[in-house]
């Protein structure tokens, strides 16, 4: 059972949006997905309360530091993907969740502040790899990006690439449809049309496919 | 719209389980690694001892045993808390004393 942990100590980086997009796209592609909402802001719970859950998605909320390892292990079934959405703070819950991850995704907006704080998650992964004696695949996912890249975005991307950080391409674009998921629940195929739905669906699917590819590589 | 074919498909067989150590010792190692980078305990702490009672402003029956029932009934009738009734009674007492 591959475990994707979505971690960044920076709030508002797009963790929950990434989690919902990934869960719904991977489930649509045929995977059984379990979403674990470990964020006291309960963003995933809000999404889950808006509409019936899409097929093949289960969700559990209110998971504390002491329960996280057991909660991940409880869903330890073959052919199932567990997605852990964490709070945007530097807590022990994050360290524990990463210890059970096959893939750590660090969403960040293309701003210096997000990158500076988000990099702490990458440093934590490296430290845990050393402490646990196993490799933990990790990647950065840019979120809320614009069609035309800012200079800041280009510079941050170049700096991360230079340091050998894996960056998921395509990034998640700034789309009304993505934020509307939390207003209507469900997935991009069930919510009322918001702007260019085809573009949003295409972006989400391409992003999820790249994550899936990394996940299969990580579990080989 | 859910009938739309997925742009890619998941090979369930490719989603292989990878054993990850979850012993208390291994988890502790991860926690120590995290603390080096400021990932510390941020769980809300419960204070010890009895949980505080809700602040209802209610007068305990033992405080005014001979009139406790009457105060309770008056409180229910007026929709005021018993504490507010006592405040009003105290104001009346003070006003009477200064006359």
Image (cartoon, coloured by chain):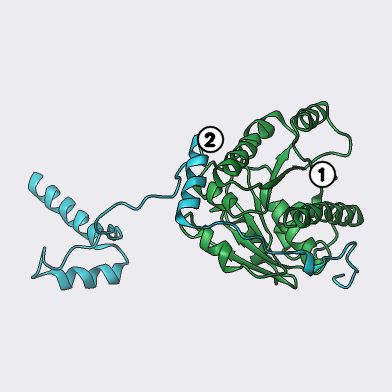
Chain colours: A green, B cyan
Q: Is A50 rendered above or below residue A146? A: below
Whether labels 2 and 1 belong to a single chain: the reply is no
Horizontal relation, residue A32 to residue B47: left or right: right
Chain identity of mark 2: B
Q: Of helix, strand and loop, which one carries label 1?
A: loop
Q: Which quadrant: the N terminus of chain A?
A: bottom right
> In the depicted view, which residue is nearer to us: A158 or A57?
A158
Q: Which mark is residue A159?
A: none
Chain identity of mark 1: A
Q: Which quadrant: the C terminus of chain A?
A: bottom right
Location of mark 1 (residue): A171
Question: Residue at coordinates 73% horizontally, 62% vertically from top-left?
Answer: A184
Q: CA distance from mark 2 to mark 1?
A: 27 Å
On the image, the x and y values in percent for residue A216 come to 77, 57
Horizontal relation, residue A113 to residue B37: left or right: right
Horizontal relation, residue B24 to residue B49: left or right: right
Q: Of helix, strand and loop, which one carries label 2?
A: loop
Q: Is A98 rendered above or below residue A72? A: above
Location of mark 2 (residue): B37
On the image, the x and y values in percent for residue A53 come to 70, 70
On the image, the x and y values in percent for residue A166 come to 77, 40
Question: Residue at coordinates 70% horizontally, 57% vertically from top-left?
Answer: A182
The image quarter in which residue A164 lies: top right
For disc 2, the neighbor class at 10 Å (few under 14, some 14 to 19, many from 20) is: some
């Amino acid at each position: 059972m591959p475990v994707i942990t979505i971690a960044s100590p920076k709030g508002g980086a797009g963790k929950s949006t990434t989690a919902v997009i990934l869960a719904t796209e991977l489930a649509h592609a045929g995977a059984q997905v379990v979403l674990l909402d470990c964020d006291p802001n309960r963003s995933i719970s809000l999404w889950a309360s808006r509409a019936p859950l899409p097929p093949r998605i289960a969700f559990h909320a209110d998971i504390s530091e002491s329960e996280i390892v057991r909660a991940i292990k409880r869903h330890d079934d073959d052919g199932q993907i567990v997605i852990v959405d964490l709070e945007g703070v530097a807590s022990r819950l994050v360290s524990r969740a990463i210890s059970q991850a096959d893939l750590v995704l660090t969403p960040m907006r293309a701003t210096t502040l997000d990158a500076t704080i988000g990099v702490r998650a990458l440093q934590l992964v490296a430290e845990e790899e050393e402490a646990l004696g196993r490799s933990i695949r990790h990647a950065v996912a840019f979120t809320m990006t614009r069609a035309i890249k800012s200079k800041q975005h280009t510079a941050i991307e170049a700096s991360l690439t230079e340091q050998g950080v894996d960056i998921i391409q395509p990034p998640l674009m700034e789309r009304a449809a993505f934020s509307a998921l939390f207003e209507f629940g469900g997935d991009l195929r069930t919510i009322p049309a918001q702007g260019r739905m085809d573009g949003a669906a295409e972006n989400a699917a391409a992003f999820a496919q790249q994550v899936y590819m990394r996940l299969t590589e990580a579990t080989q | 719209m859910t009938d739309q074919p997925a742009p890619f498909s998941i090979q369930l067989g490719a989603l292989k389980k990878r054993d990850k150590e979850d012993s208390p010792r291994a988890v502790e190692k991860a926690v120590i690694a995290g603390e080096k980078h400021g990932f510390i305990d941020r769980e809300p702490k419960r204070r010890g001892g009895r949980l505080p009672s809700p602040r209802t402003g209610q007068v305990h029956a033992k405080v005014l045993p001979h009139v406790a029932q009457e105060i309770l009934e008056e409180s229910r009738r007026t929709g005021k808390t018993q504490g507010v009734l006592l405040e009003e009674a105290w104001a009346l007492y003070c006003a009477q004393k200064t006359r």
